[in-house]
Amino acid sequence: MARIELKNLRKEWVGATAVAGVDLAIDDGAFVAVLGPSGCGKTSTLLMLAGIYSPTSGEIAFDGARVNDVEARDRNIGIVFQSYALYPNMSVLENILFPLRFKSVAREEAERRAREIAALVRIDQLLERRPAQLSGGQQQRVALARALVKRPHLLLLDEPLSNLDAALRLTMRTEIRRIQRELRVTTILVTHDQIEATTMADRIVVMNAGRVEQEGTAKELYERPATLFVASFVGSPPINLFEGRAVNGSIRVHEATLPLSADAQGAIVLGIRPESVRVTTRGTAARVFAAEPMGREVLYSAESALGVIRFLEAGAAARHREGDSLELAFAPEDTLLFDKGDGRRLEMRLAA
Amino acid sequence: MADFARAQLNRQRTNAALFLGPAVVLLVCFFVAPVIVDLVLAFTDMDRTLAVTTLTLDNFVRMFTRDSRLLASLAVTAIFVLSTLAAFNVTFALLLALTTTALPKAFGGFFQAVWLLPRMSPSVVYALLWAWVVDPNERGLLNQILVHVLGVAPIDLRGNQPLLVIILANGFIGASLGMIIFTSAIRSIPEHLFHAARADGAGPLAVVRHIVFPALRWPISYMTIHQTLSLLVSFEYILLITGGGPFYDTTVFSLYAYRRAFENGQYAYGAALSLILIVIGVIAALGMWRLMDMRRLLQAPRIEVH
Amino acid sequence: MPADTAGTPIAPPLRLDWTKLAQRARLKRGAGQSALLAFLLLVSLPIILPYFWMVVISFTARSGGVSTDVLWTACAVVAPAVLIYTVVHIAAPSPRLRLVAGVVIFVIGAALLAALVGGQLHFANYRFLWNPNIVEEIRSKATAGGQFPSVWIAFRNSLALALSQTVIILAVASLAGYYISRFAFRGREAFLQGMLVLHAFPAMTLIIPIFLILHWVGLLDTIIGVMLVLATIELPFYVFVMKGFFDGVPWDIEMSAMTDGATRRQAFRMVVLPQVRVGLIAVAVFAFIRAWEEYIFVRTMLIENTNWVMSLYLFWVSDDIMGVDYGIVAAVSVFYVLPSLLLYVFCQRYLTQMTIGGIRG
């Protein structure tokens, strides 16, 4: 299929709304990540796409045709569940063969395709084992093979890496991206981990509380977040946020007053990313109260006139200690301003 | 030091007596003792007078050579147990479990509640309802439907097909129990397996075959064994609905022993007949014990301190 | 490589007819669900109708006869209402809409029923609740074996039997279950195995020797005797259930109670027991219901008609006036079933908590 569209998609359960109106368009061959915290509705959206949940209202269209009522088995999709959902009483080979049973493929041809896919995801040595005898990474790859063997038009991945340890996660990230590039199958990945989203997908959709907050590339989300939520969710370590009040051309934050690039009134939140903050000789006075070595860099927390500022310094060892006084500076063009009421980003920055 | 150890030992003993004692006493008096009593009784000649005069093998001789009613009763038992088990306790129960779980929760729940009624009603009430249903005159519910809705003549199910009636009556009870067990087994299948199967292209029948049945293998075996035993020894509904009659036409083996003892006063003979059932019961109980997951139930306790 | 040539996607450029698939799916689902419903409705009629009938008769039968018009009228109202709601439920996707529709249909149905049938409802059949001489009045003679007592005597006896049996089971099973759960005593395994065998063993086979044992200890024909027997028969199961609940209580709170100065028995009473409250309630409800409904043991052990319980009362009433007065028999049945029903509804959620090995006996 060429294009997938979600139009005002809603999913309501008794007493809770999981998806509150989602609009999305995905092109053929794209790799899209749906990113958001747990409970934001991303898995429900995925399952509605798969045909396992039926939408309360709204439309799902493949190629312009409404497919809300089309059964999951007819949608030609492959899905990898967070728990892998391997059939416990079947061997790995039988698990992979399972979808082909319903496509009237001859047994020999089916086995050939199954082994081909197994080789692609590198589990061809494990075909006789039962799921219970496999490790998490191996199970995941079996699930992937099972999803791909039927040559689906759409591949759906629900938090595929969350059950894996760090090293395996890295390997599988590359693997999945490689496979997706090779097979050019439209892929939608659901995750709460922004690293997964930014490293694997071409485009990212950020969801929160059943709605789409923003859609774009990783760079767009990072540099021009549309809302406060996106700014605080994307970017690690999280952005420094300072609540303040804007009066005309300046904003008063905690004990400091800073000039704005345009006039504004009302409650405003100032955002400065830790990586934009530098230690200088002349800037805002700050006193360090915590230092966390994070391997490649050190994350400091310091008290200042603005409030608590977190900033980074490269190097494995901490150069400042608790109680040290420093001067911190940040480029005004790196700052972000948000309306506190609705979380929208305002098109202005701090003045130079 | 020795005093402390002795005091501790005493405390252990009183604890054991206090906590386990009541259970042990009750079980010995009313569970273990009856088995022994029955064993002995089978070899006596106790009758209506409730007095024992001699020890004799006569009961067993009679059982194996002179009792034609017993043979008839065995036939009835065989038909009853096999039919009820095959048709209702297992097959129909499976069907109920599968169909009620395939429907949306509200409907499935309603039918499950309906099928709980037989089991949770007092036996007297349930039997009474069956008596009404098969009442041979025009007021019987079945006959009402036959006459008023289908325009057919009324039938006497209780008189002409009493075996069918007790099979149906006990069958509904068995189906009720089976439905509960199978439904809970189906519910415990992780939902994502169903999702995966549907996404993989499986239709409803394929889902049942590949996902549901493998999970039901153990409950089905358990139900079969457990219900066979239960049907062999229970006669409450039969007693209430047909009384074992007309005459002895629906008297299964267990009911036969009961009637001989309490209707005819032949307590020793009844005990002898019951002994057969007791032996079967013991063998079956030991067999089921082997089948169940012993390790989990005998899990070692947390503490060794007394 | 699955790709045909380098870079070509593996999925063939298939143009599926989505609209047709959607249509087919809708039809299949509608047909499937309707077929299932029809099937279930048909096979459930033998249960639904008799119970419904029993309730209706108890409120409408006059002078012993059964007027079936009421039954059929009621069916004529209830059946379409249920069917209409079924259609609505399948068609409407939103849960709120279903609820509203359900309430509306229920109200209309109830109003119709009240209008059509209401006039025929009466409580005369329930007069056994205040008039103990119903049987004598109908038959104009005393029944064989003695007069009928007031239903409240039977009720009181049943209540006493069920309550005391429940108390015994709760006490004995909790004590034993706790001990087995906590202590590694010599013979623990043998004890558990014995319990398991006893639980699987059919106690009904022992009814004859139990009768004799009760006779020999002089407890035949007493409520106490029956109570002890009933408690014992169910004991193995309940010991396992309570053991399961105690296993779920972490032992460190007992240990901390004991280091705080409590003896083991005090720790059990003050700290552990409250934790298994849920288990105790579940066991109590089930044990009560079972004793309330017991027939065969009471019939066998209570031989003279001096001790009445509800099951016996209903049995003899129906035996006596069954062919003559359906209404009263129905009313007594409803009265007898009601407590069980209410308790069952109340403890539905506890049903799932009582399992050994995932299978409830």
Image: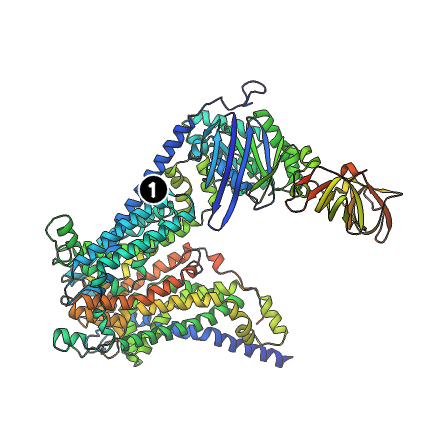
Give the SS element for disc 1.
helix
Say whether residue C143 is visible. Answer: no
Residue count near mark 1 (Cα–Cα under 10 Å), binned few <14, some 14–19, many ≥20: some
Q: Residue B216: x, y in percent? A: 39, 47
Position above or below: C8 against B39 = above
Q: Residue at x 62, y 76 (%)?
A: C261
In percent of width and height, residue A187 lies at 56, 31
| Left or right: A94, with A35 as reference point | left
Residue C49 position in % (x across, y down): 24, 55
- Quadrant that contains the C terminus of chain A: top right
Horizontal side of C191 relative to A176 (left or right) equals left
Residue closer to the observer: A148 or C335: C335
Residue farthest to the right, as pictured: A281
Q: Please state if A336 lies on the left or on the right of A66 as rendered.
A: right
Q: Is residue B54 placed above or below A163 in the rendered structure?
A: below
Label 1 sits on residue = C33
Report if residue C216 is visible in the image.
yes
Q: Nearer the viewer, residue B248 or A22?
A: A22
Provide the chain ID for the residue under circle 1: C
Three-letter amino acid code at the position of disc 1: Gln
- Say if C172 sits above or below A52 in the image: below
Q: Residue at x 56, y 46 (%)?
A: A39
Relative image position of residue B153 (x, y in whole percent): 10, 51
Residue A118: quarter of image: top right
